[in-house]
Structure formats: C-alpha cells, structure tokens
Image: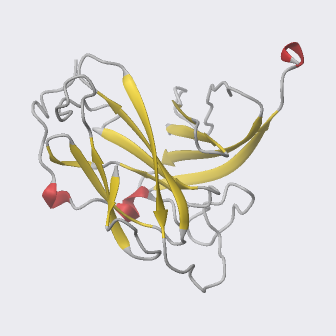
Amino acid sequence: METVPARPEAGADFTLRLDLIDGSTGRPVDDLTVHHEALAHVVVTSADGRYFRHVHPLRTAPGRLEVRLRADRPGRYLAHTELEREDSGGQLLTTGFEVGGEAPAVAKTGTGDPAGVAGGAGCRACSPACPSRAGPPRSSWIPPPGYGRGSA
Amino acid sequence: MTGHLLVRNQDGDFLGHVHEMGTPGARLRFTFSFPTPGRYLAWIQYATADRIVTTPFTVDVTASEARR
C-alpha cells in the first residue's frame, strides 16, 4: 500500500493506493469479486479513532485499487481492507500511513470521535464520516474482468 | 433499515465487521464476539433514504468469569 503523495498533508486530498500481488505467483491479483456491493471495502481510521471513513476503492489497473481521501489532522492512520477473490474466502489486509502537516486551527466540533463526542450539528455524529464525501474519481474506474456478470 | 458494525481495538491490529441481519425497522441488532478484554472503538453505519449515517461509540470488554 502507498499513498500519493508519499506523505499526505492534513487537509489536502491524497490517493490511497493498494497494489495487490498474489504471494504464490507474484502476479497482480485481478480476480476480486464483488461482496456487499463493492470490489473492496477500506476502513480508514486515525490511531485515536476520531477519524473514520468507509470507502470503496476503484480498480484503476490490474491488481491496483485506488481511492481519494483527505485527513483533517496529522498523525498515524490505519487502513483495513476487506476483499474477496474468486473461489476464495474473504481477506483482511491491515496497513498504515502517516499524515503530516498542521492540525486545523478551528475549534473542535462534533466529529466521529468514538471516545466521547457524539454530537455535531447537521449530520448527527457523522460529520467527517460520510463515505460519500471521500468518493473516488469515477471516471478512472476500469471494470475488472467479468464485472457485471454477477457473482455466484 | 440495515446497517453494519465495525469494531477496532485501540492498537488497530484487530478489526471486526458484521452486518445486521435483522428485519426492517428502527432497531439495529448485531451479533459480535470480542476476542479479548479491553476497550474497542466501534462505528455503526446505516443508510436512510438519502444518506449514510455513522454513529461512533466505544465498548469496554471485561474478561468473563469463566476465563479468569
């Protein structure tokens, strides 16, 4: 997994990229199946849990999944990826990355903070957590082989 | 209304994910077994007509008497 740029800045968009390689063949993993209506589910959280995104990366090349994100604060982030290959069980990949830059100077408001703050005007505790706000660029999506065929 | 539950431990080396399988209604119920005692960060997500709602909370899991 990598981020583009390699060290994202707080408040700036970046790309989270997953290059999936089959450990036994060394070839790109290009046989992901759709489960729960997506090729892969990525949960990105800050170490303290205040930041939470559940996003669906898109296939931009064989074995490559990408999604655009933005983190509000610097620090350590975790990316948990759930995916499923053809005729295989589900897999969970755990990776992490660092976000640099400065924390925003604005006062804290209701956030996705599971450690206590559950308020937040307008969006009921989900202000930074709506996946639609971090949607990937749809135009760059390349359907995987067999996509739309329906899974058995 | 169906949703799912995501659970992470504080280190982040554990992530659990279960889907609600209940009948439609205003109550979400999940079945989940926590692997070890400790504090977990949890998020429930569900869809309404026009958006996805995320609700964060924490769960403190104690060791069961039988395993002490």
Image quarter for residue B61?
top right
Q: How is the image coloured?
A: secondary structure
Image quarter for residue A85?
top left
Instruction: Choose between B22 and A129: the one closer to the eye.
Output: A129
Residue B22 placement, left or right of A130: right
Image quarter for residue A143?
top left
Residue A116 placement, left or right of B9: right
Residue found at x 38% / y 60%: A132
Residue found at x 60% / y 55%: A47
From the top left corner, tell me how far across and down residue A142 is, in percent.
12, 48
From the top left corner, tell me how far across and down residue A74 is, in percent.
54, 71
Instruction: Choose between A105 and A147: the one closer to the eye.
Output: A105
The quarter in which the C terminus of chain B is drawn is top right
- The total number of labels drawn is 0
Instruction: Choose between B19 and B49: the one closer to the eye.
Output: B19
From the top left corner, tell me how far across and down residue A3 is, in percent.
34, 60
User: In this rendering, is residue A32 above or below A123?
Assistant: above
Residue B60 placement, left or right of A150: right
